[in-house]
Amino acid sequence: MDNPRQWLAQNADRPALLQAVSHPDPAMRYWACRLLDHHELDDAVATRMLAALSDKNKKVRQAALHTLGCEACKPSDSESIPLDIVGISLEVMRSDRSLRVRRAAAAGLMWQHPMERRVRRAFHRMQRDESDPELLSKAERAIFFADRRTQVA
């Protein structure tokens, strides 16, 4: 199959997308996660995405994180299940083996308003312990803008 995205978009209904998250081909798993991002985040989708956070492929893990956390991509009339996406994102930001995935988690957390204490603490720890310049920059900007928003309010 030359184009997993096109095939899934044209041929896969929601149950098939859920099944494709476990497909042997990482491109199929990635595109299944990306396409499920535009579906309601119910128990079935959340369960698959939580499992995909442990995928061998970093692009699949990053797509799963986005699907779990991006409210803007969900249908406007959908009801998301109660899920601690902040806690999940913090864990990914701290411990994912891919710098790319950790950066994506940090980017998702850095604009949180108001910033939760646990997020602020995680960014302070990152400033102290992190060596990656991009993650350090995200931590610095997150804290700077959170402080700025607090002063303006």
Image (tube, grey):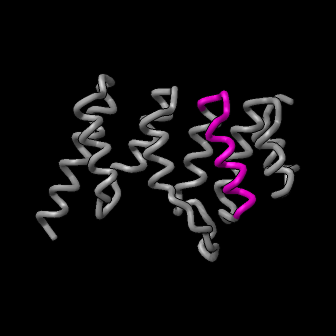
- Among the 4 quarters of the image, the one containing residue 52: top right
- Which part of the image, by quadrant, shows the C terminus? bottom left
In the foreground, 10 or 119: 119
98 in relation to 41, above or below: above
In the foreground, 36 or 19: 19
- Which part of the image, by quadrant, shows the N terminus? top right
In the foreground, 28 or 69: 69
Q: Does the magenta stretch include residue 81?
A: no
Q: Is residue 45 magenta?
A: yes
117 in relation to 144, above or below: below
Residue 59 position, x and y percent, is 61, 33
Residue in the image at 81% along x and 43% along y: 20
Locate residue 9 relative to residue 111 in the image: left or right.
right
Question: What residue occupies the far top of the structure in this picture?
Answer: 131
Residue in the image at 24% along x and 41% along y: 124
Q: Which portion, as a residue range, is magenta?
A: 43-58
Residue 77 position, x and y percent, is 63, 76
Locate residue 6 relative to residue 47 in the image: left or right.
right
Query: Overall secondary structure of the magenta stretch?
Result: helix
Locate residue 72 relative to residue 10 in the image: left or right.
left
Residue in the image at 82% along x and 29% along y: 2
Residue 122 position, x and y percent, is 32, 44
Residue in the image at 59% along x and 73% along y: 76
Residue 37 position, x and y percent, is 64, 54
Task: Report the label total.
Answer: 0
